[in-house]
Image: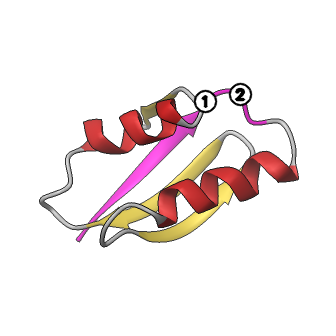
Amino acid sequence: MKEISLRIDGMHCGACVRRVTQVLHKLEGAEVKEVRIGAARIAVPETVPASAILETLAKSGYSAHLEQ
């Protein structure tokens, strides 16, 4: 498992936090560590590329980028 930290644009309320949490839980093998307004931390299998996570969020209406 690798842990990924994300900065997520467009989140502004508790409903956004719930929506992003739901979307991230749908990723195969993902373990959602934390979701808060504007950010998230998840653990995913090594085989899951970061681009797949970003694409999944984009399809749900949230642009995101990896936090270094």
Residue 3: x and y, percent? 34, 61
Q: Residue at x 36, y 66 (%)?
A: 43
Residue found farthest to the right:
13
Residue range highlighted in magenta: 1-11
Report the amino acid beneath label 1: Gly
Colour style of the rendered protein structure = secondary structure
Pick the front one: 56 or 10: 56
The label on residue 37 is: none
Mark 2 — residue? 10
Q: Is residue 32 left or right of residue 46?
A: right
- Earlier along the polypeptide chain: callout 1 or callout 2? 2
The label on residue 61 is: 1
The majority secondary structure of the magenta stretch comes to strand
Report the amino acid beneath label 2: Gly
Q: Can the viewer see residue 47 in this picture? A: yes
62 in magenta: no
Quarter of the image where the N terminus is located: bottom left
Residue 19: x and y, percent? 69, 52
In the image, residue 65 sits, relative to residue 49, either above or below, namely: above
Disc 2 element = loop
1 and 2 marks in contact (CB < 8 Å)? yes
